[in-house]
Image: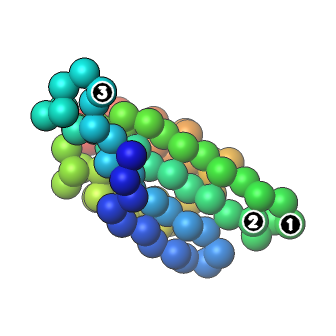
Amino acid sequence: MKTVKQIFVGGIKYSLIQNVSNINKNIISWTISIETDIFEFPEKACFTDVTISKDFAEELLNRLADGYVTPFSADEVIENYLVEYA
């Protein structure tokens, strides 16, 4: 796993992480991580293997950051985004 992009907005860190398959090194998927401690305790959400498209993953990451999506609400937002655009 390798972090390829991070965005820091309003005390929230959004990360795009590259995953390479252990079985086939040609298969790459993308994970999105969201972390914050703005509510006085650390909060983190990690969504593995969201897509195999880097462009799609980056667009999703940017939209999450633009909307100040927190780890708490990220699962619903990501699910809705995937239903709408995937």
Question: Secondary structure beneath disc 3?
Answer: loop
Looking at the image, residue 38 sits to the left or right of residue 10; the answer is right
Tag 2–tag 3 contact (CB < 8 Å):
no
Which of label 1 and label 3 is nearer to you?
3
Which residue does the image show at 37% across and 53% down from the upper left? 2
**Mark 1 → mark 3, Cα distance in angstroms:** 37 Å
Question: Which amino acid does the dot numbered 2 rest on?
Answer: Asp
Does residue 66 show up?
no
What's the residue type where badge 1 is placed?
Glu
**Residue linked to disc 2:** 37
Query: Which mark, by number, is residue 40?
Result: 1
For the residues bearing labels 2 and 1, Cβ distance under 8 angstroms: yes
Q: Are marks 1 and 3 in contact (CB under 8 Å)?
A: no
Which residue appears at 33% of the width and 62% of the height?
Answer: 4
Q: CA distance from mark 2 to mark 1?
A: 6 Å
| Left or right: 64 as drawn, with respect to 45 | left
Q: Give amino acid for label 3.
A: Asn
Q: Position of residue 26 (x, y in %)?
A: 13, 34
> Tag 1's secondary structure?
loop
Left/right placement of residue 56 relative to residue 71 reads left
Quadrant including the C terminus: top left
Could you tell me which secondary element the residue under label 2 belongs to?
Answer: loop
Q: Nearer the viewer, mark 2 or mark 3?
A: 3
Q: Which residue is mark 3?
A: 22
